[in-house]
Amino acid sequence: MSDVPPSTEEKRPDTVPRAANETNPLRLILLLLVFGVALAGLLWDYTIARPTYQKAVQTVNDLLDGTMKDPSGDGS
């Protein structure tokens, strides 16, 4: 037998390697940036794009139904 004491890896094999325990701040920034862009897109869709789209659809439907003669409303 040898008189060399066991290394720390042999004493505790259930520990996670050191690199896996560290968090990378760049990953967090990138994740929050992606989340922010997705949230901004969702807010833009509900507040600006959807009402504009619904108004355009209503205008086209009115033109097709014949209830609206001039979509611009300038009388020409």
Image (cartoon, rainbow, N blue to C red):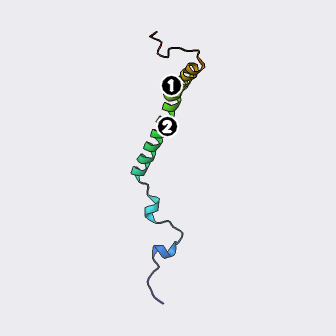
Mark count: 2
> Which quarter of the figure has residue 23?
bottom left
| Crowdedness near tag 2: few (<14), some (14–19) or many (≥20) residues, C-alpha within 10 Å | few
| Residue 18: image location, x then y, percent | 44, 64
| Residue 76: image location, x then y, percent | 44, 10
Residue drawn at the location 41% of the way across and 54% of the way down: 24
Instruction: Identify the amino acid type marked 2.
Output: Leu
Give the mark nearer the N terminus: 2 vs 1: 2
Residue 72: mark: none
Instruction: Identify the amino acid type marked 1.
Output: Thr
Q: Is residue 17 above or below residue 2?
A: above
- Write down the residue under mark 2: 39
Residue drawn at the location 49% of the way across and 76% of the way down: 10
Q: Is residue 7 above or below residue 18?
A: below
Q: Is residue 55 above or below residue 15?
A: above
Nearer the observer, 29 or 64: 64
Seen as rendered, the residue at the extreme bottom is 1
Q: Is residue 62 above or below residue 49?
A: above
Residue drawn at the location 48% of the way across and 42% of the way down: 35
- Label 2, secondary structure: give it: helix
| Residue 53: image location, x then y, percent | 52, 27
Residue drawn at the location 54% of the way across and 20% of the way down: 59
Seen as rendered, the residue at the extreme top is 75
Task: Tell me, yes or no, whether the two marked residues, 2 and 1, touch with CB atoms within 8 Å.
Answer: no
| Residue 66: image location, x then y, percent | 58, 17
Seen as rendered, the residue at the extreme right is 65
| Crowdedness near tag 1: few (<14), some (14–19) or many (≥20) residues, C-alpha within 10 Å | few
- Label 1, secondary structure: give it: helix
Residue 52: mark: 1
Nearer the observer, 73 or 2: 73
Nearer the observer, 72 or 17: 72
